[in-house]
Image (cartoon, rainbow, N blue to C red):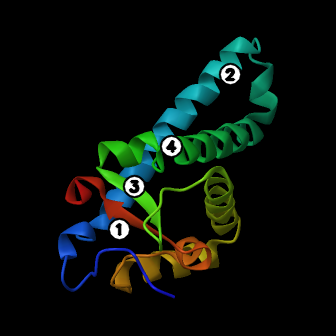
Amino acid sequence: MTWHLPDPDRQPEFYRDVAPKRLVAFVIDTVIILALSLIGVLLTAFTALFFFPLLVAVIGFAYRAVTLAQRSATPGMQLMALEFRTLEGQRLDTRLAVLHTAGLTISFMIPIIQIVSVILMLTQARGQGLSDLALGTVALHRRAAS
């Protein structure tokens, strides 16, 4: 397979500090998801408190899948100047956005998968996690691409 992405040895600026920036983006997105979930609690006259973890999971899944499908980046990733691309250099489509979000969800349900994914992000030249490797995606610096 021919990769249509920047070479990490010749253009390291595309991949520099991607893993820690992904972590910061995740924290930003989590805060937004929690805020949206709290709004959901208010809109349901507090009955959503009875199933709050499920509400957070559903809102989080929808938030990530929709924002990845629209811009190939979540708002947190946009603030950190990151975006996902396929190995062919294309932005994520809806199918890949949903699959990537499902991969993240599964990795949080099975912590060993998340640990392996983080280790891969920190040790791979392109900083790809398990979901990235399985789906053929990579997180890049958006500004470097400009």
* In the image: residue 85, left or right of residue 144: right
Q: Which one is closest to the eye, mark 4 or mark 3?
A: 3
* In the image: residue 54, left or right of residue 64: right
Q: Work out whether mark 1 precedes mark 4 in sequence or the reverse, and give the earlier one.
A: 1
Q: Which mark is residue 30?
A: 4
Report which residue position mark 3 lands on.
Answer: 83
Q: Which one is closest to the eye, mark 2 or mark 1?
A: 1
Q: Secondary structure at mark 1?
A: helix
Q: Work out whether mark 2 precedes mark 3 in sequence or the reverse, and give the earlier one.
A: 2
Q: Which mark is residue 40?
A: 2
At horizontal 20% and vertical 76% (from top left) the residue drawn is 12
10 Å crowding of disc 2: few (<14), some (14-19), many (20+): some
- Alpha-carbon span between mark 1 and mark 4: 16 Å
At horizontal 57% and vertical 72% (from top left) the residue drawn is 114
Q: Work out whether mark 4 precedes mark 2 in sequence or the reverse, and give the earlier one.
A: 4
Q: Amino acid at mark 3?
A: Glu
Residue 135 location (% of width, % of height):
60, 73
Q: Secondary structure at mark 3?
A: strand
Q: Which mark is residue 19?
A: 1
Residue 143 location (% of width, % of height):
22, 53
Q: Amino acid at mark 2?
A: Gly
Q: Is residue 46 above or below residue 55?
A: above
Q: Amino acid at mark 1?
A: Ala
Locate residue 138: give its quadrant: bottom left
Q: Secondary structure at mark 2?
A: helix
Q: Work out whether mark 2 precedes mark 1 in sequence or the reverse, and give the earlier one.
A: 1
Q: How many marks?
A: 4
